[in-house]
Amino acid sequence: MQLVHRLALILSATAALLCLSGPVQAETNQPSKGPEQKFSAILIWGTDSAKPEGKDLKDVDSTLKDKFQKIFKWKNYFEVSKKPFSLHQGESHMLKLSPKCDVKVHQSEKEGLEVELYGEGKFVVKRKQTMPLSDILILAGDDKNASAWFVVIKPES
Amino acid sequence: MPSKIDYPTAGDEVLVKAAQKGDMPAFEELVSRHRDKIYARAFSMVRNEEDAVDLSQEAWVKGWQRLNQFQGESSFATWMTRIVINLCLDQLRKQKRVKSESIDQMEEDSGGVERQMPVLNPNPTENLERGELRVRIDKALAQLSYEHRTVLILHEFEELEYKLIAKKMGCSIGTVMSRLFYARRKMASLLAGLKREELQTEK
Amino acid sequence: MNNATQLKVMSYLDNELSAPDARQVAALITNDPEARAVYNELKETRELVRGNELSLTLKEPKDFYWSQIQRKIESAEKAAPRRASAPLWVRLLAPIAGAIALAAVLLSIQGPQIQPLTTHVSAMHEIENNPEMATITFRSESEGVTVVWVSSRETAQEPAEQFE
């Protein structure tokens, strides 16, 4: 239950959502090889409430928003942060999407794409995906006040 | 080793505590004690015997599943009654008994029946046995739309205040008040009609 | 007497008015014959109905009635682990017709478009999660989206149901 509360704080309405700091950290294990694939990692907040005033939240890209509205039940979706990155085989990227939300993305020859999600530094979930990534991958969960958080890994052409 | 409970003579509190620990025979005794009341509440709302039996059984199943939520803030019977009321409300909403409601709704909205009729003395008890009176009142209730009957049941029998009735029925307090006013005046009209009928029979 | 006043008289009868309003209506009832007549009628009706609820007895024999309940309890307990995921699915999905159709596609077990990836684990679609968490994975072929929903194991197994 403690972990649930901690994870629920990932997108707590104020400071966590506003803080977009954190440089992209590329941890390259071995020389890049193979084709490069470009991605965006996007942190989105879903809520039935209106956009809170004074918060630096952007509108979600319309194509992505359409998909969200078809799949999920919330009325509004706001972009908290967006980090573009690219990966070659064998490369990893650690991205800080908010002060409490980190995503590690790794591409390996055998395992394909691995996406790991960390909430407040604690491991939450890891998903392996075939490469090249064609689907948009969304890791998501409940946030407080009946809202939800979404970490989107989106391939970019 | 748990002490043996004499189920038929044990109080509800003892039975509930035992049932909360998984004692099914204790729960069976509770069902046996209160089944008529729960069934009666369901029937008063849905006015169909088969549905009332199903809903009352569903209420008992839910009661078993949620037993650990019962903290003794009310009597066990009252707690179970609330469960069956909620199930009945869900069912009635799904069934959408529009026809009878719309007639009453139109009358209620236009302020027809209840505002225009003269004030009545609805008390026809002089010539009726208690049991017969209750049957007649129940028949009068059956003539109300489900929304008017529900608000009357929740207020008169369950003694819920307007605000809680509004919450349960998913409407405004103003709507609850209008419906209750209409329901009472219609009941008065139906029961006063009974008295006139009785007087004519005597003649 | 207008409808608003009639409703106030009724509210007075039911102790739903604030003290100042109650005093006002009490005075009205004392001084206005029409208000008094409405009040008396409502009061008599209320007392008549309240004091005379029909008692009903279930026709079904006790043993039979109980055996049906017992069977339903046992059946519900057996179904509970599978059913635990259903409310979560329902909660996730947009409550509009198109999305419900999409949900049917997502949740159905018919046809190649359905990807219940929690059961279809291949080397390239693996999930690892924190032991305290549970995940549900689903895919929409038409939207080109794979969703991994993360929740606490407590929530996933016993979806909260608020009861009053």
Image: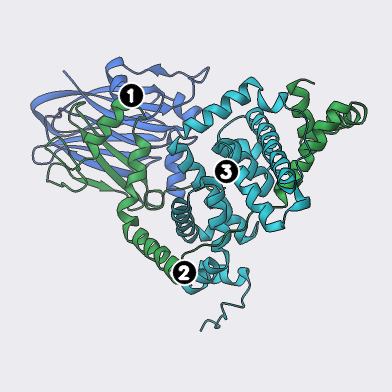
- Whether residue B199 sits left or right of residue C155 in the image: it is right
Residue that carries the numbered disc 3 in the rendered image:
B142
* In-front residue for pair A9/C38: C38
Instruction: State which quarter of the image contains the N terminus of chain C.
Output: top right
Where residue B131 appears, x then y in whole percent? 67, 58
- In the image, which is nearer the foreground, mark 3 or mark 2? 3
Disc 3 and disc 2 in contact, CB within 8 angstroms: no
* In-front residue for pair A74/B53: B53
Which residue: 55% across, 34% down?
B170
* Disc 2, SS: loop
* In-front residue for pair C52/C66: C52
Residue that carries the numbered disc 2 in the rendered image:
C61
Residue that carries the numbered disc 1 in the rendered image:
A69
Q: Amino acid at mark 2?
A: Pro
Which chain is home to disc 2?
A: C
In the rendered image of this protein, which colour is used for chain C?
A: green
* Disc 3, SS: helix
Q: Residue furthest left?
A: A34
* Disc 1, SS: helix
Asked if residue B62 shows in the view, the reply is: yes
In the rendered image of this protein, which colour is used for chain A?
A: blue
Q: Which chain is cyan?
A: B
Which residue: 75% across, 44% down?
B199
